[in-house]
Image (cartoon, rainbow, N blue to C red):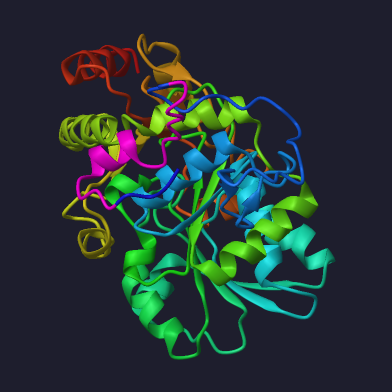
Amino acid sequence: MENKSYKGFNTKAVHGGELKIPEFGNVTTPVFENSTFVYPNYNSGAYLDHTSNLPYIYSRWGNPTLQALELKYSELENSKHGLSFSSGMSAIVSTVLSMCKKGDRILSISDLYGQTSSFFSKDALEMGIETDFINVEKLNSGNFSGKGYSLIYLESITNPTLKVSNIKSTAKIANETDTPVVVDATFASPYNQKPLDLGAKVSIHSGTKYLAGHSDIVLGMVATEEHLFHKIHSKRKVLGGTPDALQAFLASRGLKTLGLRMQKHNSNAAEIFRYLKQEKKVKRVFYPGDPDSQFFEAARQNLSGYGGMISFELKGGIEAARNFIKHLGIPSAAPSLGGVESLVTLPVDTSHSTIPPEIRKSMGIEDGLVRFSTGIEDPEDLIYDLQNALEVI
């Protein structure tokens, strides 16, 4: 089991990390659904756990099915080291706690996933780790310093207003003070962005979303350099955020079609953006590929594709938005994203429901804002469905 130097993204996605056992002749990696392994293993040909370079001992530490996924994922990130986790939040918490201790400070963008924001503002703070927040606009302006911080944390594309962080310029400034940059790149996927190539030290994904791609597992992934890899793995062992082998198998299967799916997500979202941009009942559209957006230059420099996420504000506010969602036929109303099926959600009723209205508005989240995760359905069907739903408001 090894990383091979394939050139193409889809070739890496299909063949990278696969565990082939000649005695069985298996074409795909088996599911090692076992808790423990014979140890010490004196077999001279024993497979080695890449987290320790020793034979496998216990699945919380490492597992062959997990390792196959981790090697495949790391190839897609152009990294030698990858780790899987039981959820995206497990990946985030394990990473941050492996890099920070009591008395340290974090610099983070303020436009964060709600649970991440809560972790920084409450849980990490209770551990003596403080966080200073700046908005993406200030981050991209370069009007900050990494001095005094243990890490700089950002999301490559924010939720739900889809602001694009300039990883390149942030990493350049951070390097002046040797401050590592950690990026949650879930909305981009490794197909559209490789944060380590842009200067980040850690790339994090909620593998639940685009990586697995079928809305059937919960998983997290991390790609990084060797030193941090071992520190983060050590924290994963202690916190117990190791995924089950079946989850890893399903994620690995999903990764094999990531490139093909992202091509469709990218093209579908671009067509839907063009339709919504001219729709009279739509007040505003948020999309990384919008040439009129103040974040378009950052998107152009940091993304190779603009992803499948679109948010748009409807005229008529929250009642119009709820009525619109109720009359959609194809997308399900569900608070996730990145699957082959289209999903729609109203942030004011879900992810940002506990945030006071005045703070939501300061974040650019109006009551009539709809978040649309574009699936891989045919774009003409999706646009027709949107048209029908808009007609009733």
Quadrant in the rendering for residue 254: top left
Quadrant where the C terminus sits is top left
Kindly identify the residue that appears in the image at 78 percent across and 67 percent down.
Answer: 125
Foreground residue among 177 and 342: 177
Q: Is residue 16 left or right of residue 147?
A: left
Foreground residue among 256 and 188: 256
Q: Identify the magenta region.
A: 5-24
Q: Main secondary structure of the magenta part?
A: loop
The correct choice, above or below, for 99 with respect to 12 in the image is below
Residue furthest to the right in view is: 126
Residue 313 among those drawn in magenta:
no
Measuring from the top left, give residue 132's x and y in whole percent.
Answer: 62, 74
Quadrant where the N terminus sits is top left
Kindly identify the residue that appears in the image at 71 percent across and 47 percent down.
Answer: 61
Q: Is residue 195 left or right of residue 347?
A: left
The correct choice, above or below, for 16 with respect to 338 in the image is below
Measuring from the top left, give residue 294's x and y in whole percent.
Answer: 26, 62
Q: Is residue 355 visible?
A: no
Kindly identify the residue that appears in the image at 56 percent across and 26 percent down.
Answer: 217
Measuring from the top left, give residue 4's x and y in whole percent.
Answer: 32, 49
Q: Is residue 110 left or right of residue 80?
A: right
Quadrant in the rendering for residue 324: top left
Q: Is residue 29 visible?
A: yes
Count of numbered tags: 0
